[in-house]
């Protein structure tokens, strides 16, 4: 039995270990060498906002750059509604896709640099690499050492159970930002500004349906995130038909 499993058996009530039990990758929260940013550090990074925007404008195609700005703005609004630091949410939104259009070998390099053990289906799905790679880029190149912000970027594509409020803000902002126009987005957007968990339930359902319809692999964390939201809120939605949702 591994040390983690031993600890689980010895202390199953520890919430962090419960997450470990649900999903090995979620337990690996890349906190080594990180800490919470001080208000002064946040102010310092915000003072460099224009510089960061210029950097991203150079790294990303126009549409991706505009998406990053929109997600940052949406994350700020959702943060204000949910007691999350709006500047941290804005910065995480700005950097969340910073590796998205970089060559695969660059993405792979930063993903490896993050230092987390990643599940095989992430390693085997290059479209998912930009999330852990972006987390490492923000930490190592920009010097934003905030573990919560790093995790928010790492999990922005898959989500995970037991997300922090900041992680939820970024996850939801990414799929309801102003330029998003997929069928049903209005409903998710409306839910997002009412209750983040509702948006996760409805948005997670859309994601799962889309993956299952195409016979794609469902990330364990995405399923566990959906189950967490459904166990809390699903009963309230049960009477509504598929068409309404
Ligand atoms: Fe992304
Ligand atoms: Fe995005």
Image (cartoon, rainbow, N blue to C red):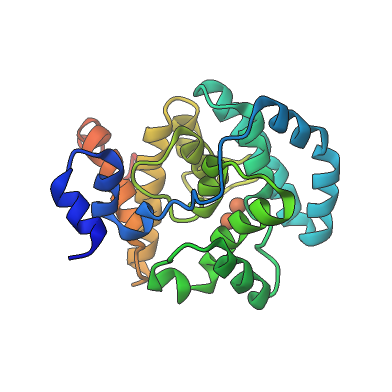
Asked whether 12 or 25 is in front, the reply is 12
Tell me: 17 left or right of 192: left
The structure residue drawn at horizontal position 51% and vertical position 35%, both measured from the top left corner, is 166
Tell me: 232 left or right of 125: left
The structure residue drawn at horizontal position 38% and vertical position 64%, both measured from the top left corner, is 211
The picture quadrant where one finds residue 25 is: bottom left
Asked whether 172 or 113 is in front, the reply is 113
Asked whether 208 or 182 is in front, the reply is 208
Q: In which quarter of the image is ligand 1?
A: bottom right
Image position, residue 197 (x, y; %): 38, 34
Image position, residue 117 (x, y; %): 43, 66
Image position, residue 105 (x, y; %): 65, 78
The structure residue drawn at horizontal position 81% and vertical position 46%, both measured from the top left corner, is 53
Q: Is residue 186 above or below residue 181?
A: above
The picture quadrant where one finds residue 15 is: top left
Tell me: 130 left or right of 43: left
* Residue found farthest to the left: 9
Q: Quadrant of the N terminus?
A: bottom left
The structure residue drawn at horizontal position 62% and vertical position 34%, both measured from the top left corner, is 37
Q: Please state the total of marks drawn on the protein image.
A: 0
Image position, residue 114 (x, y; %): 56, 61
| Residue 242 shows in this picture | no
Q: Is residue 157 above or below residue 167?
A: below
Q: In which quarter of the image is the C terminus?
A: top left
């Amino acid at each position: 039995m591994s040390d983690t499993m031993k600890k689980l058996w010895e202390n199953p009530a520890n919430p962090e270990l419960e997450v470990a039990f649900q999903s090995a990758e979620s337990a690996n929260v890349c906190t080594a060498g990180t800490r919470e940013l001080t208000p002064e550090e946040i102010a310092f990074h915000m003072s460099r906002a224009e510089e960061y925007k210029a950097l991203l404008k150079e790294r990303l195609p126009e549409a991706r750059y505009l998406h990053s700005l929109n997600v940052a703005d949406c994350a700020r609004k959702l943060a204000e509604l949910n007691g999350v630091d709006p500047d941290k949410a804005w910065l995480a939104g700005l950097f969340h896709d910073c590796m998205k259009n970089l060559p695969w070998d660059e993405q792979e390099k930063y993903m490896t640099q993050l230092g987390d053990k990643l599940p095989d289906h992430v390693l085997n799905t290059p479209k998912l690499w930009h999330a852990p790679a972006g987390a490492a880029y923000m930490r190592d190149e920009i010097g934003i050492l905030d573990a919560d912000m790093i995790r928010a970027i790492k999990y922005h594509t898959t989500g995970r159970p037991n997300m922090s409020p900041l992680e939820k803000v970024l996850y939801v902002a990414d799929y309801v930002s102003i330029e998003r126009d997929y069928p049903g987005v209005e409903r998710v957007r409306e839910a997002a500004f009412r209750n983040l968990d509702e948006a996760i339930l409805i948005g997670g359902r859309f994601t799962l349906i889309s993956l299952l319809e195409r016979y794609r692999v469902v990330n364990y964390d995405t399923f566990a995130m959906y189950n967490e939201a459904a166990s809390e809120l699903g009963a309230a939605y049960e009477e509504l038909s598929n068409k309404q949702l």
